[in-house]
Amino acid sequence: GAVVSQHPSWVICKSGTSVKIECRSLDFQATTMFWYRQFPKQSLMLMATSNEGSKATYEQGVEKDKFLINHASLTLSTLTVTSAHPEDSSFYICSAHTGENYGYTFGSGTRLTVV
Amino acid sequence: GQSLEQPSEVTAVEGAIVQINCTYQTSGFYGLSWYQQHDGGAPTFLSYNALDGLEETGRFSSFLSRSDSYGYLLLQELQMKDSASYFCAVRNRDDKIIFGKGTRLHILP
């Protein structure tokens, strides 16, 4: 089946530094990827939609300058958390539509801890 | 706006049947999905309903009534490994998947 590879699976960084998270579609082309954030015991909140070759579209309340999204190819989307702060600590997950039965495949997620 | 309502927690006994309900309000509805998520893991796709009726996949079934903006996930022959959070999600006209708050399913032996 369709696989989205996400890494790193976890990262610890110092306040003020930037962290890049990558998502790759391994056996299909993903012109669109979605980035979610999930706090403990809460739902997945859509942050932005990543579009290959064009600018990402951000959901209301999400700072585009803080969460930089790049979708440079049909198989790779990246999310960079810039100038990270402890409140950015969360589980970040990407997703792409596989084209099969309207299933959306998720990456394995990245647990970010900012200290 | 968009909103999905589902119970926050449900408890059932191993071997039993449990139903998790979901009501939704959204713009440009295209379908209702269900996802399972174990603690620390990523969501996994369970089912999708675009049309009214029941979809069955093994022990899991999902139902949709578009006129009532309502759906449910039915889990049969519950196993301990089914203990997880279950999310309903709508696909809207922007092709985005918007998630409900999730239902935590506790299974008792």
Image (tube, rainbow, N blue to C red):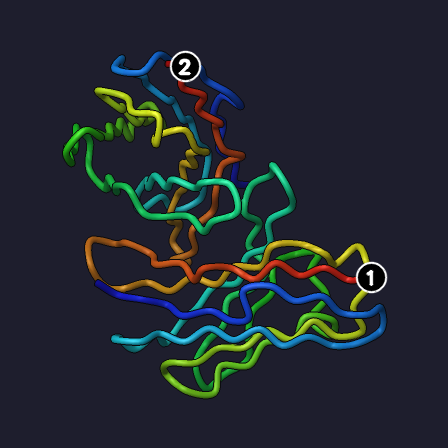
Chain ID of residue with mark 1: A
Q: What element carries label 2?
A: strand
Q: Which residue lies furthest to the front in this view?
A: B109
Q: In this view, does A73 lie above or below B5?
A: below
Q: Quadrant of residue B93?
A: bottom left
| Residue displayed at 43% across by 56% down | B96
Residue A92: x percent and y percent?
58, 59
Q: Name the residue under label 1.
A: A115
| Residue displayed at 35% across by 12% down | B13
Residue B65: x percent and y percent?
26, 26
Left or right for A18, reference A47: right
**Which label was assigned to residue B102?**
none
Q: In which quarter of the image is the N terminus of chain B?
A: top right
Q: Name the residue under label 2.
A: B108
Give the crowd class for mark 1: few <14, some 14-19, many >=20 residues within 10 Å.
Answer: few
* Amino acid, disc 1: Val
Q: Is mark 1 on a helix, strand or loop?
A: loop
